[in-house]
């Protein structure tokens, strides 16, 4: 399952709370979701987030523990 790297924008939360969350890719429909839910349970509302092309800053430990492991193609 594809995963997005997302963190809350500066000014939305303090700098120490701007961790890099792992978010499952939303279903492919034509609507922008009102919110994203990270694997750790963090709710990220539309307009609060910045999408990252690569990990940046401190990773969210909760997301790292809960993200599904890739399945082997056998």
Image (cartoon, rainbow, N blue to C red):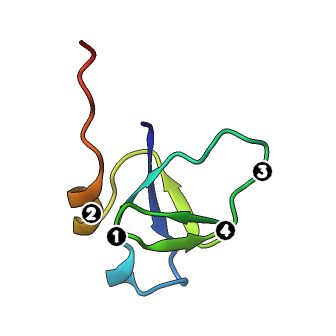
Please give the label number shown on residue 30: none
Q: Position of residue 45 (x, y in %)?
A: 61, 72
Which of labels 2 and 3 is toward the front? 3
According to the picture, the residue beneath numbered tag 2 turns out to be 59
Mark 4 residue element:
loop
Tell me residue 58's x, y (percent).
26, 67
Q: Nearer the viewer, mark 4 or mark 1?
A: 4
Q: CA distance from mark 2 to mark 1?
A: 5 Å
Q: Using the image, tell me which numbered label, if any, was put on residue 46.
A: 4
* Tag 1 and tag 3, C-beta contact below 8 Å: no
How far apart marks 3 and 4 lie (CA) works out to: 12 Å
Point 26% across, 58% down: residue: 66
Quarter-wise, where is residue 15 in the image? bottom left
Say if mark 2 contacts mark 3, CB within 8 Å.
no
Left or right for 13, reference 19: right
Q: Are the residues flagged by discs 2 and 1 in contact, CB closer than 8 Å?
A: yes
Residue beneath disc 3: 31
Residue 15, compared with residue 38, is above or below; it is below
- What residue lies at 30% left-to-right and 51% top-to-bottom? 67
Q: Are marks 4 and 1 in contact (CB under 8 Å)?
A: no
Q: What residue is rendered at 27% in x and 63% in y?
A: 59
User: Which of pointers 4 and 1 lies earlier in the amino acid sequence?
Assistant: 1
**Secondary structure type for disc 3:** loop
Chain-order first, disc 1 or disc 3: 1
Name the residue tied to disc 1: 19
Q: Does residue 61 lie above or below 31 as drawn?
A: below
Please identify the quarter of the rendering in which residue 53 is found.
top left
Which structural element holds mark 2? loop
The front one of 61 and 65 is 65
């Amino acid at each position: 399952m594809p995963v997005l790297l997302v963190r809350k924008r500066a000014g939305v939360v303090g700098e120490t709370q701007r961790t890099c969350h792992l978010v499952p890719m939303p279903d492919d429909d034509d609507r922008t979701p009102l919110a994203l839910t990270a694997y750790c349970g963090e709710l990220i509302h539309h307009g609060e987030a910045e999408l990252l092309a690569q990990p940046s800053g401190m990773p969210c430990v909760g997301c790292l523990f809960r993200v599904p492991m890739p399945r082997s193609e056998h």
